[in-house]
Image (cartoon, helix red, strand yellow):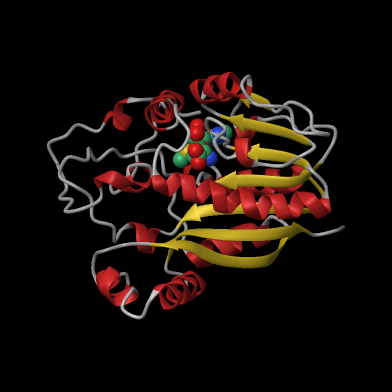
Amino acid sequence: MPACITFPSPYSGLIGAVLPAAEEGYTQMKTVPDPSRNMDERSWWDFWNRSYRTKDNNDAVSSELFERAAAVVNEITQTDGGRVLEVACGAGGLSRLLAYSTYHGLDLSPAAVEIACEKAKDLGQLRGASRPRYEAADFHVWPLQPDPFDVVVCVDAIVCFRDQRLAMRKMAQCLRPEGRLLLTAINSFVYNRIRRTPTTRLQNGPVSHWLSRRELHELVKSAGFTIERMWTIMPRGNRGILRVINSHKLNHAFGPRCAAFLQRLKERVGLGQYHVIIARKQAR
Ligand SMILES: C[S@@+](CC[C@H](N)C(=O)[O-])C[C@H]1O[C@@H](n2cnc3c(N)ncnc32)[C@H](O)[C@@H]1O
C-alpha cells in the first residue's frame, strides 16, 4: 500500500456526501489545509469514519442512501439467500438495517470497525440470523472465504479503491454462481453541481478514480456480472442546469403526486446523486 495517495483535486464529493447541512452557497476555500493530503489511507478513513459515522442518522443523505440500499438488499435476501458480505462497510450503518442469515462486513478502517462492533452489542438478535461480524481488512488482499456469499454489497466506496478492477473481480469471486451484487457509487455529474457553504472545509479524500456511468457499467460487466438493473437515486444539485431541474418551486408547482413523478423520472434518466447497480454473477 502506498504510504500516501495524492489525488486530483476536487474530491469535495465524498465529504459533502455526509455534510448535507453545509450545502448552500459554497465557495472553494483554497486556504484551508486539506488533512487527507498528509495522511496515509487508513488514517484518513479512520478520521472520516470517526467524524461522520459515529452516530446513526448522521445526516439526511446517508440515512436515505442506507434506507434505499437496505430495501433493495432485503428484497434479494428474502428470496435468494441471506449470506451477506459487505465490502467497505464503514461503521456498519447499513448493516443495522439489513435482514440476513449471516453478515460479514469488512473495512480498511479499524476505527470504523470498532464503532460497528460497539453498536452491534446493542442490537437485538434477528430470528434465524447469526450475530454480525466485522473485520478490519484491506479488501485488495483479503483472503477468499471457503463459503461463498449469496449477496455482496458495496455502498459508496468503489471510487476509493486503489485497484477498482481487482476489487470488482474479488467481489465476483466471493459470490456463489448466480449470486447478486448491489453496488452504489456517487454520480459525479450531479455531485459536482451541489453548492456548499463557505463554512464547509474542503477535504480531498482518497478517490482513486471517479467513474462515469459508462465506466461503472463496463467495470461491473468485465468482472463477470450480468447487469440486471442500473438506475440512479436521490436527485439533487443546485448549480448549472440542475438549479432549474431541481427547483423546489417548479417541482412542487403541481402538487405532491407530480413532484413524486418528477423525482422518479429524474432518477430514471440519471439525475440522482448515486448510481445503483444490481448485477448477477454469471454461472460458469
Ligand atoms: C465513503 S466511505 C463509505 C463507508 C460506508 N459504506 C458508508 O457508507 O458509511 C468509504 C469506505 O471505504 C473503505 N475502504 C477504502 N478502501 C478500502 C479497501 N481497500 N478495503 C476495504 N475498505 C476500504 C474506507 O475505509 C471507508 O470506510
Instruction: Please tell me how many numbered marks the rendered image carries.
Output: 0
Residue 134 vs residue 173: left or right? left
- Quadrant containing the C terminus is bottom right
Q: Position of residue 27 (x, y in %)?
A: 15, 50
Q: Residue furthest bottom?
A: 254
Please tell me whether residue 45 is drawn above or below residue 172 in the rendered image. Answer: above
Please tell me whether residue 275 is drawn above or below residue 245 in the rendered image. Answer: above
Residue found 16% across the figure and 53% down from its top: 25
Q: Position of residue 87 (x, y in %)?
A: 62, 38
Q: Is residue 221 visible?
A: yes
Residue 143 vs residue 118: left or right? right
Q: Which quadrant of the figure has residue 217? A: bottom right
Q: Position of residue 91 (x, y in %)?
A: 53, 30
Residue found 31% across the figure and 62% down from its top: 237
215 or 128, which is in the foreground?
Answer: 128
Residue 153 vs residue 39: left or right? right
Residue found 69% across the figure and 55% down from its top: 223
